[in-house]
């Protein structure tokens, strides 16, 4: 069966941790001479498994995003929505725009520029099979649980630890049910909401290149990755 897939792209983060000047907003910060958001959108646009794209940005960025969509010819972007004060709210606003003609929802952070065909296709394929999937990489550092006063409480066996990334993909009914929770503002990861419903979430193999641009160091690192020297 040919299931239809929509991509939801939260890109309404303020970029405070990037130390940007007030007028320059994170989705439009330049990476390799191109706006950050254009990378994720280009990967989704060129993917044969993606049928539509919904993007959330801050209200003040809507005009700029429209201009970018026109400039790069992102024909699959059907809706631009106003983001909320948290990622949870931004994704929820996007989900409200996803109609019943779509079977699978793939959610990807606009701040992760190294999305590629394989990450998209793997996530979609696993969501079709299992209902929910999260892209993740094995943890390479040892992980400590820390108490409030900065003393170590315990050490977690890292063989059982994975770091969640996006894309994450879900059957539409399932992610809508998961996002119907109240008080989800502290939620930073979509799949954790599905876990809370007691439903299984499959891991899709991520990539250490698939970084999220949060700080100035991330941006510098992304420039290096872009040069292809790593
Ligand atoms: O804040 P964090 O780094 O977890 O952001 C992950 C993604 O969520 C980014 O692409 C960011 O633009 C987006 N976001 C959003 N609305 C917010 C906060 C973050 O769409 N209020």
Image (cartoon, helix red, strand yellow):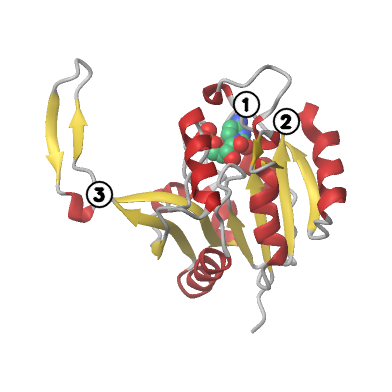
Q: Which residue is mark 1?
A: 14
Residue 164 image offset from top left, x and y in percent: 40, 49
Is ligand 1 less than 8 Å from the beta carbon at label 1?
yes
- Disc 3 element: loop
- Local crowd at mark 2 within 10 Å, few (<14), some, or many (≥20)? many
Where residue 219 appears, x then y in whole percent?
Answer: 53, 36
Q: Nearer the viewer, residue 30 or 142?
A: 30
Quadrant of residue 85 within the rendered picture: top right
Q: Residue furthest bottom?
A: 1
Mark 3 or mark 2, which is nearer to you? 3
User: Quick check: marks 1 and 2 in contact, CB under 8 Å?
Assistant: yes
- Residue denoted by label 3: 140
Q: Earlier in the sequence, mark 3 or mark 2?
A: 2
Which residue is nearer to you in this view: 180 or 18? 18
Name the residue nearer the viewer: 188 or 225: 225
Q: Is residue 90 above or below residue 198?
A: above
Q: Which quarter of the figure has residue 206?
A: bottom left
- The residue positioned 19% from the left and 55% from the top of the image is 159
Q: Which residue corresponds to mark 2?
A: 58
Disc number placed over residue 105 in the picture, else none: none
Instruction: Give the alpha-carbon distance from disc 1 to disc 2, as whole Å.
Output: 8 Å
* Residue 58 visible in the displayed image: yes
Q: CA distance from mark 3 to mark 2?
A: 35 Å
Query: Residue at (18%, 42%) from the top-left corner?
Result: 142
Residue 91 relative to residue 139: left or right: right
Q: Indicate if the residue with disc 3 has its beta carbon within 8 Å of ligand 1.
A: no
- Compared with 164, 31 (above or below) is above
Ligand 1 shown in quarter? top right
């Amino acid at each position: 069966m040919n299931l239809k897939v929509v991509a939801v792209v939260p890109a309404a983060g303020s970029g405070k941790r990037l130390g940007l000047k007030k007028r320059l907003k994170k989705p439009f910060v330049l990476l390799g001479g191109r706006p950050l958001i254009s990378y994720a959108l280009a990967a989704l646009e060129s993917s044969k498994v993606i049928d539509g794209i919904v993007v959330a940005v801050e209200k003040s960025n809507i005009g700029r995003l429209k201009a970018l969509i026109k400039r790069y010819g992102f024909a699959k972007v059907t809706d631009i929505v106003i983001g909320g004060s948290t990622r949870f709210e931004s994704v929820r606003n996007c989900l409200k725009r996803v109609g019943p003609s779509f079977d699978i929802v793939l959610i990807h952070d606009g701040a992760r520029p190294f999305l590629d065909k394989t990450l998209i296709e793997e996530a979609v394929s696993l969501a079709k099979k299992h209902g929910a999937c999260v892209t993740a990489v094995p943890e390479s550092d040892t992980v400590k649980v820390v108490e409030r006063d900065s003393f170590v409480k315990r050490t977690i066996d890292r063989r059982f630890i994975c770091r969640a990334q996006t894309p994450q993909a879900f059957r539409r009914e399932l992610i809508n049910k998961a996002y119907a929770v109240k008080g989800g503002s502290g939620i930073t990861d979509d799949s954790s909401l599905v876990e809370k419903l007691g439903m299984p979430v499959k891991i899709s193999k991520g990539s250490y290149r698939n970084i999220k641009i949060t700080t100035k160091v991330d941006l510098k690192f992304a420039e290096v990755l872009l040069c292809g020297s790593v």
